Amino acid sequence: MKYLNIILLLGFLIRGLATFSRGGMLAPIISIIMCIMIMSLTDSRFQERIGRVVYAFIAIFIIGFAGFYYVNDVSGGLLEMRFKGESMYNKEKSTMFSGREEIFQEDIEVFQDNIATGVGPGMSSEKRREISGIEAAAHIEYSRLLAEHGIFGVMAILIIVLFPVNVFFNLKSPDNKVILIICIVFVFITLGHAAMRTAAPGFVYGLAFLNIVRPRA
């Protein structure tokens, strides 16, 4: 099973890297690191297994590096350029965040002008076009919530963030805690670069609250 898992992991890594999605690949890595850190500080049972966990993460890192090298070589170096935020067509205007920082600033400006109720669902793109002349889709869910829903968006963000925190401190099973942390961190990162343009954030957010029950021997 270990060898099968390694083969599947390498296959999924290569497939994921081939999509050229930086956030989609970095989010799981950051989620795993955050999970190890939080569980090491909060769960004594996890601390007993920390050696094996770190060993597994190092193995994953090595496999990931091999996958990155392979896809970068096949793509002629384009994958490395993508992760650096560079464009082969216009390197001078290339940025690490691909213009997301401008969308964020415009959303905050819209929120400041419409604090009470926002500009309404789906209307932030129209307002951004009025500000910058470019009608760009939302890439940052947090600023979109503020721009389109105003103070209600603030409440929505608080619910999204505080609910899993409350659940975490009420969980007893380390398995459930691990799943919760990895899924929630993945969602928070994804909402910061891809908003809700894909089904992944909503699905994984619900997946975070799975309750695993091990059968008694």
Image (cartoon, rainbow, N blue to C red):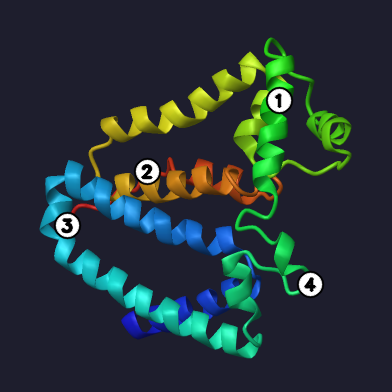
Specify which label sits upstream in the sequence, 4 or 2.
4
**Residue occupying image coordinates x 38% and y 44%:** 180
- Marks 1 and 2 sit apart, C-alpha to C-alpha, by 41 Å
User: Tag 4: residue type?
Assistant: Tyr
Residue 176 point in image, percent of width and height: 32, 46
Residue 154 point in image, percent of width and height: 57, 20
Direction top: furthest residue: 116
Depth order, front residue of 148/161: 148
Tag on residue 109? 1
From the image, tell me which residue sits under label 4.
Answer: 89
Secondary structure category for the residue under label 4:
loop
Residue 202 showing in the rendered view: yes
Specify which label sits upstream in the sequence, 1 or 2.
1
From the image, tell me which residue sits under label 3.
Answer: 217
User: Tag 2: residue type?
Assistant: Asn
In the image, residue 157 sits, relative to residue 180, either above or below, namely above
- Marks 3 and 1 sit apart, C-alpha to C-alpha, by 59 Å
User: Tag 1: residue type?
Assistant: Glu
